[in-house]
Amino acid sequence: MPLYTNGPFDEALRKRVLEPDTQHTKLVYRDIEDELADFCRYVPPVKAHFTVYSTKLWGLVLRASAEVGSQLHAIVAEQEGKSRDTSVKDYIALEPVLKLSSCELLTRFEQDPLVPFANFSSGQSPPWWKDYNAIKHRRLESLQSATLENALSAVGGLYVVLLRQWGEYLMPRPMTYVSGHKVAESPSSLFTVRSLPW
């Protein structure tokens, strides 16, 4: 799969975005993001609330992280030209190409950047990915890892991966008008991109 770059218009990438599987991916992301945004109506995503945990967040961390793994698996398969079992080590190995560790997001409530894949730059799994595995395999013992911070990181991580794969072909920025001037809005209801390295 050709990865998105901020270059000339890519007709082949646009056509792939229109395929049913890619559109399904977008709907899955929107569903997950909407659930998290709904939760954040009651528990604003500010640092003071990052340690809040719940069964609702447990489901969001599981779904978002599983989708991150699925999308990264697809990228590895396309880069290598074959499908095989993959793990986070394979995703970290592609960091020089993917550059996920350099993508920074801002939430609508915090000005400190959220960098879901920051640990990839040092060859490590992100903390939220480790917690996802704990939650997945030992739910009763690990429910306290289903935090708002991990949910934000997992959903933000999925947003970053989809931007890396498809860019604005999948996540176009809607335009609005302010005093007669066009202003681009974020395609996400939770995140604004602070920096993209590609």
Image (cartoon, grey):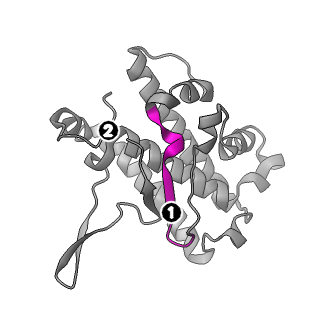
Q: Which mark is residue 120?
A: none
Could you tell which of marks 2 and 1 lies nearer the N-terminus? 2
Q: Nearer the viewer, residue 186 or 41?
A: 186
Side (left or right) of 91 relative to 77: right
> Mark 1: which amino acid?
Leu
User: Vertically, is 132 above or below 56?
Assistant: above
Which residue corresponds to the image point at 51% horizontal and 44% vertical from the top-left?
A: 102
Residue highlighted by disc 1: 106
Residue 121, percent from left and from top: 60, 36
Residue 24, percent from left and from top: 35, 44
Side (left or right) of 73 relative to 164: right
The verdict on residue 100 being magenta is: yes
Side (left or right) of 72 relative to 56: left
* Quadrant the N terminus occupies: top left
Residue 147's quadrant in the figure?
bottom right
Q: Residues within 10 Å of mark 2 (few under 14, many from 20)?
A: some
The verdict on residue 144 being magenta is: no
**Span shown in magenta:** 98-110
Q: Secondary structure at mark 1?
A: strand
Q: Taking the image as drawn, is residue 189 in sight?
A: yes
User: Vertically, is 5 above or below 79?
Assistant: below
Q: CA distance from mark 2 to mark 1?
A: 21 Å
* Quadrant the C terminus occupies: top left
Residue 23, percent from left and from top: 30, 44
> Mark 2: which amino acid?
Tyr
Residue 153, percent from left and from top: 59, 53
Which residue corresponds to the image point at 32% horizontal and 46% vertical from the top-left?
A: 167
Q: Secondary structure at mark 2?
A: loop
User: Vertically, is 158 above or below 54?
Assistant: above
Give the number of marks. 2
Q: Taking the image as drawn, is residue 67 in sight?
A: no
Residue highlighted by disc 2: 4
